[in-house]
Image: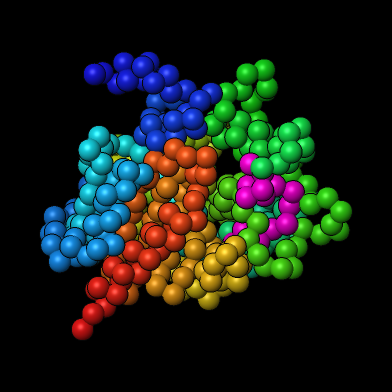
Amino acid sequence: MALKDVLAKSSVSLNNWQLNRKLGLRQLQHILPDLMSVNARTTRPLTASYDKVLAAQPQLKALSEQPDIDGFVVLKGSHIVFEHYADDFSPSSLHSAQSATKPVSILLLEKAILAGRISIHDNVEQYIPEIGDGFHGRSVKDIMGMNVLHEFNEMTAYTAPAGSRLEQIRFADERSFGYLPLNEHAPISRRDFAKSLKRLPHHSSNENTHNTMVYATINTEVSGWILERAMDKPLTAQVRELMHQIGGEDTVYMSVDHEGIPSIGAGLILTTRDFARYGMLLRDCTCLPAARKEAITKMPNSSNKYSLSLTVSETGYSHSGWGGQYLFVCPKTDIVVVVFGGINGDDPMPKSYFDNLESITAAIVAYYNRP
């Protein structure tokens, strides 16, 4: 069946893709209004070297049987040591990485730090004097650590009362992403959306004194704006260069906002193997020690912390994504683990699902740390 017939049969659109999230996450490149794409100049080589002993581990076998898993790849160095796909998914199938895109910002930050153009302790207004009071006064470290107390918190926005300010902000957020149709609303860019955010009501400051995560993808987009100003180079050019460095075997897409600015908070669309190639860049990033050192923002219901667009745990560095996406790297063992998921349920971020992924990655690290 041709793709257009599949889309017609399922009626996947901006209006309803969350109702069939599993299919929607595989088809965002066809329904989002604005994207950029790269066919890499040079493909980053991977070799198949499957580890049958690793594949026989009970946790990996159990994960492979979960209906929510679309694609799952484990790299050791540049070797594919484990690989699994759903029956209707393949190594050439595209999928949205969602928030597992956010580490793009630390890869761009690395370039700016190495060029001597920025410090993570610089305040946002040094680069964006026009920023609104939702961000004014906060450092690069605060912004990339989800440690800013402005009025938008994605963790609570989806249960906000109908008609509330928070619900209205959520709709504006999704329209600026291109994840909702505009209908009669005027286009709003991600940067204009960022400028519109205010301090949390009844708070005299946007400083998050509790250092607990206040998660908002717009923070990551603001970090990209900072890096554009710091490097005096359009973010589009920086992201396109990084997309080439992924070295994808297939086309790699990045969604952009209505003004063409890359959505580095959730925009990557690529195959599972190319997702792993992106993980290789992160695994080799020189800023990972700084992420661990600066990790002070506590994650809810977890011993993990969040720093410089990464979840920092005892075993390594990771980032999850809406609907079941997961990226994990462990430089010590030279491991990359990537998972594409398609969770259709009411809860797109079930704690049990991601706890299981963390347990599995810990087991993989332990397997390669064995004597």
Dominant SS type (magenta): loop
- The location of residue 60, given as percent across then percent down, is 26, 59
Quarter of the image where one finds residue 243 = top left
Q: Observer-nearest residue: 317 or 284?
A: 317
Task: Kindly give the residue lying farthest to the bottom in the view shown.
Answer: 371
- Please say whether residue 359 is visible from this viewpoint: yes
Up/down of 305 relative to 29, above or below: below
Quarter of the image where one finds residue 59 = bottom left
Q: Observer-nearest residue: 50 or 47?
A: 50
Q: Observer-nearest residue: 117 or 357?
A: 357
The residue at 86%/58% (across/down) is: 204
Q: Observer-nearest residue: 334 or 15?
A: 15
The residue at 34%/65% (across/down) is: 361
- The location of residue 77, given as percent across then percent down, is 23, 65
Up/down of 282 relative to 370, above or below: above
- 53 left or right of 30 in image: left
Q: How is the image coloured?
A: rainbow
- 355 left or right of 332 in image: right
Quarter of the image where one finds residue 127 = bottom right
- 125 left or right of 67 in image: right
The span picked out in magenta is: 145-158
The residue at 39%/60% (across/down) is: 356
The residue at 64%/26% (across/down) is: 187
